[in-house]
Image (cartoon, rainbow, N blue to C red):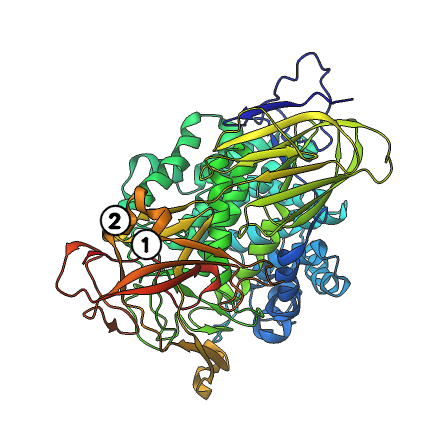
């Protein structure tokens, strides 16, 4: 007997339930927003219900055995017992909470007992630190000490990070102590903010108030306390006006106007506040910001030039690692509120391009600034607006500036946490793709498991297999939501080998409504085509699906020792990376036309991807094409020197040569925005 398969295509899922004919309305298995907040279509699942598989599991394993799992011994002056968030006389600001904000979800996603033990003292001390008036955290400022942040203990900002930690801890464990703890703190904020606003101690709290607002709404959805909505209005009022910045001001079209990480964190605030205010202008603000950045500060990795202040999108300007992980968190938050495919596409762009290349393969070091065109990793004074001596693009434990050493850990675990969502129509949604497995309740509360098998983003096919461990012979009716990326023109969906006849449309959500059986299999195929996008000064970038491609260069990694007087600031060692490969290539303009791209860029894929694909040697996909050498394009201060990126003709063009491109995330040295020339 064939089952009825109904597919709806939803262009912009947000706010409110969707009709399912004459079916009775069911209470969501995972309640979302409580009225009067606008309801969500997509609802975050408890931490630990989504488990990585395949290459993603290996990625998280490397974090577990690398810096994330051992920061307390690698960076003891901040992550060790002296930290003020453990009652010590050391760091009292953001760096300790930053680490736990990534370590905690990693520990519970991987179900790692040792990592959980490392998290627990931070939770216990924080709970015990709460005063009768609701204040929590360190409360004592101390004299300066090199390498520590020992003042501004009362600043609102680091408490926002710890609120995120406590929210995740509750999600993972259900510890009932968290609810009165956060309730008392938010009552304290409601009383104190009129006199000591978010920007009272530092501008960080004022610009990053969206993180605070998210947690107030989260608690409201649990308790329904009306004062939390009053607090929400107050927090929004005191937060930097990102909506006005995006809609009416010129910050995104002039250099040095904003701090790069503040932009990444503030980006979500209009969409978060939309849940309470429900003015469509708030959602338009973040969309307009992306459109504006595309033509000013934007880079083809989904981020922007910011080292640390904003710069126009020259591919040799730096992009800070903290910006990547904070923008990912913002996009994950906006996706839950809006259900808009645009934000899932954007999230994958950052996660699958910028994030892998900015840490070492075994997660023992990170890079403060990455360059899209990066021909050397070395101790050179580059043209960055905020230089930290000459260590900004080295791979090290503390090189550049140490905030990223603590903050980078949230990237992959929170990405994993946002691969799957519950839906307000009692279904399950796969909106971001990676090998994984999820257990969740659907329909009338039945528990199911779905395994996602894929080598995405390198391959085009994603297979979903359903398992009903307690109900092998029973059918369960629920909707399954699948994202169709905007870059995919001809997606194909099959169910148990049979094609779905309904039209599939790019940039929308496919909602498959049917009675499912255990072992049912849905296969989503997302054909990837090579495309050319234009960026700074007309430079050309080669893209395929969610991936940016870059010139493959030989890489010579060398571990160097810092001078004794530098160790507190930059750590005891660092990696430099050099190459003997030529890099000064332009792309022939004739190859970039729509008619010629398919012939000029030849895609080759490996039969089996490595367990860890983000390396030069194990890149699963290669694109072969030709390039034109530019003899006059030379190195300048460790970077690719100035060059007109788009010129119809030029006397500096050499002969045509075969070149090889690999996924940007697999590279360390590269050219990814190419000049364009006519021979």
Please give the name of the residue rendered at 53% of the width and 50% of the height, measured from the top-left corner: 457
**Labels 2 & 1 near each other (Cβ < 8 A):** yes
The part of the image, by quadrant, that contains residue 420 is top right
Distance from the alpha carbon under mark 2 to that under mark 1: 8 Å
- Of residues 512 and 330, which is closer to you in this image? 512
Count numbered badges in the picture: 2
Q: Picture coordinates of residue 266 (x, y %)?
A: 44, 45
- Residue receiving disc 1: 310
Left or right relative to 544: residue 176: right
Q: In this rendering, does residue 195 appear at all?
A: no
Which quadrant of the rendered structure holds the N terminus?
top right
Q: Picture coordinates of residue 255 (x, y %)?
A: 26, 53
Secondary structure found at label 2: loop
Numbered tag placed on residue 286 in the rendering: none
Q: In this rendering, does residue 10 appear at all?
A: yes
Q: Identify whether 395 is placed above or below 255.
A: below
- Residue receiving disc 2: 254
Direction top: furthest residue: 22
The part of the image, by quadrant, that contains residue 115 is bottom right
Q: Earlier in the sequence, mark 2 or mark 1?
A: 2
Secondary structure found at label 1: loop
- Of residues 319 and 405, which is closer to you in this image? 319
Q: Identify whether 422 is placed above or below 19.
A: below
- Of residues 561 and 488, which is closer to you in this image? 488
């Amino acid at each position: 007997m064939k089952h009825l398969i109904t597919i709806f295509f939803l262009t912009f899922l947000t706010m409110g339930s969707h009709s399912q004919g004459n079916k009775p309305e069911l209470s969501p298995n995972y309640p979302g927003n409580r009225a009067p907040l606008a309801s969500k279509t997509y609802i975050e699942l408890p931490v630990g219900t989504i488990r990585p598989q395949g290459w993603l599991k290996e990625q998280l394993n490397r974090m577990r055995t690398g810096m994330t799992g051992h920061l307390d011994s690698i960076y003891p002056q901040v992550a060790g017992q002296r930290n003020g968030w453990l009652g010590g006389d050391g760091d009292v600001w953001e760096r300790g909470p930053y680490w736990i904000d990534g370590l905690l979800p990693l520990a519970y996603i991987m179900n790692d007992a040792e990592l959980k033990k490392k998290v627990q003292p931070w939770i216990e001390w924080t709970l015990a630190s709460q005063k009768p008036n609701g204040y929590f955290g360190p409360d004592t400022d101390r004299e300066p000490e090199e390498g520590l942040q020992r003042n501004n203990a009362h600043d609102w900002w680091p408490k926002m990070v710890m609120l995120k930690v406590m929210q995740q801890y509750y999600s993972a464990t259900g510890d009932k102590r968290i609810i009165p703890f956060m309730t008392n703190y938010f009552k304290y904020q409601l009383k104190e903010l009129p006199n000591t606003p978010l920007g009272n101690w530092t501008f960080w709290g004022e610009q990053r108030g969206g993180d605070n607002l998210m947690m107030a709404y989260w608690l409201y959805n649990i308790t329904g306390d009306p004062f939390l909505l009053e607090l929400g209005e107050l927090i929004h009022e005191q937060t930097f006006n990102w909506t006005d910045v995006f809609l009416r001001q010129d910050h995104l079209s002039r250099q040095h106007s904003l701090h790069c990480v503040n932009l990444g964190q503030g980006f979500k605030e209009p969409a978060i506040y939309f849940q309470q205010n429900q003015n469509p202008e708030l959602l338009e603000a973040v969309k307009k910001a992306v459109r504006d950045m595309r033509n000013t500060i934007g880079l083809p990795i989904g981020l922007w030039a910011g080292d640390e202040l904003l710069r126009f999108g020259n591919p040799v300007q730096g992009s800070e690692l903290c910006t990547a992980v904070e923008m990912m968190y913002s996009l994950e938050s906006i996706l839950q509120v809006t259900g808009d495919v645009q934000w899932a596409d954007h999230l994958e762009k950052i996660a699958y391009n910028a994030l892998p290349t900015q840490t070492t393969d075994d997660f023992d070091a990170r890079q403060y600034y990455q360059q899209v065109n990066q021909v050397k990793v070395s101790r050179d004074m580059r043209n960055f607006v905020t230089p930290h001596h000459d260590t900004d693009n080295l791979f090290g434990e503390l090189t550049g500036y140490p905030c990223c050493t603590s903050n980078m850990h949230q990237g992959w675990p929170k990405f994993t946490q946002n691969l799957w969502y519950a839906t307000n129509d009692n279904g399950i949604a796969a909106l971001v793709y990676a090998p994984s497995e999820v257990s969740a309740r659907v329909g009338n509360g039945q528990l199911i498991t779905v395994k996602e098998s894929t080598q995405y983003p390198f391959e085009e096919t994603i297979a979903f297999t359903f398992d009903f461990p307690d109900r092998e012979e029973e059918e369960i009716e629920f909707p399954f939501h699948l994202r169709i990326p905007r870059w995919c023109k001809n997606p194909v969906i099959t169910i148990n080998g049979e094609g779905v006849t309904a039209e599939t449309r790019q940039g929308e959500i496919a909602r498959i409504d049917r009675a499912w059986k255990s072992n049912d299999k849905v296969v989503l195929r997302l054909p990837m085509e090579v495309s050319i996008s234009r960026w700074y000064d007309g430079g050309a970038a080669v893209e395929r699906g969610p991936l940016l491609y870059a010139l493959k260069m030989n890489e010579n990694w060398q571990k160097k020792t810092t001078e004794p007087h530098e160790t507190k600031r930059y750590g005891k060692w660092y990696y430099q990376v050099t190459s003997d490969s030529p890099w000064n290539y332009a792309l022939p303009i004739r190859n970039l036309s729509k008619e010629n791209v398919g012939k000029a860029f030849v895609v080759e894929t490996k039969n089996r991807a490595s367990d860890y694909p983000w390396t030069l040697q194990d890149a699963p996909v290669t694109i072969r094409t030709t390039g034109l050498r530019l003899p006059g394009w030379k190195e300048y201060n460790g970077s690719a020197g100035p060059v007109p990126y788009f010129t119809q003709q030029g006397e500096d063009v050499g002969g045509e040569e075969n070149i090889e491109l690999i996924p940007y995330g697999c590279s360390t040295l590269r050219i990814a925005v190419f000049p364009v020339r006519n021979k």
